[in-house]
């Protein structure tokens, strides 16, 4: 059974608690069927990791500002590029077939952004595992945990799913060929495009009514 920390992180990652939502100790304990002590300890741990923050006497799920978002994507691009480079060298035939099957399956879910978002996390995690470097996997887990603080997946943006899956296919093909440089380049391009898509959407949503 998962501990309280993992349960809360999963709930944030799955969107049960969105950025800005209050996290109430008693409610969390009741939801997950655990005592309040491990929940309190989990919240303290999440606060030190900046995944939750104080709002008066309450704790709320943190929100990433523009600079934090840029910093997170920078670190993500570097670490995931390394994972792709290592995976091109060390991925087993079985791991490569799993990655290809993920892309094939996702083509059937182009109109379901929630399903695609969950599958996208699994796809990237599979690449991390295929790097066969436990320390890199640990660091990427931390990065992707913080990705949950983004209120909306870029895959929910119109037109992005089809393009993203084409990018996934390019990554898989580079891995299948064993071309470490191509795998790194494809992965970096994918992360860059996701970041650009998110910035465009954020800019569009932040624009108020015209003064003209």
Image (cartoon, rainbow, N blue to C red):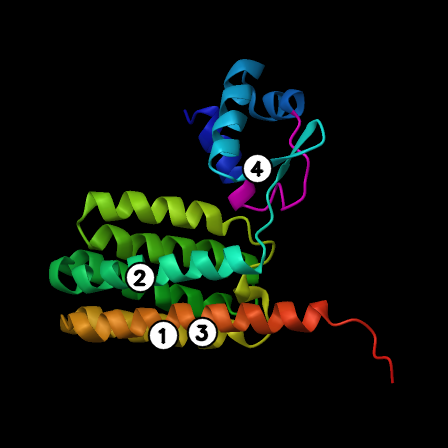
Q: Which residue is mark 1?
A: 189
Q: Earlier in the sequence, mark 4 or mark 2?
A: 4
Figure check: 69 above or below 11:
below
Residue at horizontal 38 percent and vertical 44 percent from the top: 142
Horizontal and vertical percent position of residue 92: 14, 57
The stretch in magenta equals: 12-24
If the image is split into quadrants, where does the N terminus sit? top left
58 left or right of 195 in image: right
Q: Which mark is residue 78?
A: 2
Q: Earlier in the sequence, mark 2 or mark 3?
A: 2
Front-lying residue, 2 or 66: 66
16 left or right of 83 in image: right
Question: Can residue 144 be spotted in the picture?
Answer: yes
Quarter occupied by residue 179 = bottom left
Q: Secondary structure at mark 1?
A: helix
Front-lying residue, 126 or 44: 44
Horizontal and vertical percent position of residue 126: 29, 54
Quarter occupied by residue 173 = bottom left
Q: Which residue is mark 3?
A: 193
């Amino acid at each position: 059974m998962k501990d309280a920390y993992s349960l809360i992180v999963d709930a944030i990652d799955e969107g049960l608690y969105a950025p800005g939502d209050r996290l109430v100790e008693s409610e969390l304990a009741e939801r997950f069927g655990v005592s309040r002590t491990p929940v309190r300890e989990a919240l303290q741990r999440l606060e030190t990791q900046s995944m939750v923050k104080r709002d008066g006497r309450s704790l709320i799920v943190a929100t990433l500002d523009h600079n934090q978002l840029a910093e997170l994507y920078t670190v993500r691009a570097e670490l995931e590029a390394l994972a792709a480079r290592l995976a091109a060298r060390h991925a087993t035939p079985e791991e490569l077939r799993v990655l290809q099957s993920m892309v094939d399956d996702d083509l059937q879910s182009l109109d379901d952004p929630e399903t695609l978002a969950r599958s996208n996390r699994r796809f990237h995690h599979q690449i991390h595992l295929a790097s066969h470097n436990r320390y890199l996997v640990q660091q990427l887990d931390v990065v992707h945990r913080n990705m949950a603080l983004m209120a909306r997946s870029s895959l929910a943006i119109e037109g992005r799913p089809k393009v993203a899956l084409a990018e996934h296919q390019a990554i898989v093909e580079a891995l299948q060929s064993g071309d470490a440089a191509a795998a790194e380049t494809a992965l970096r391009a994918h992360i860059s495009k996701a970041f650009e898509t998110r910035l465009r959407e954020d800019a569009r949503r932040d624009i108020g009514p015209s003064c003209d």
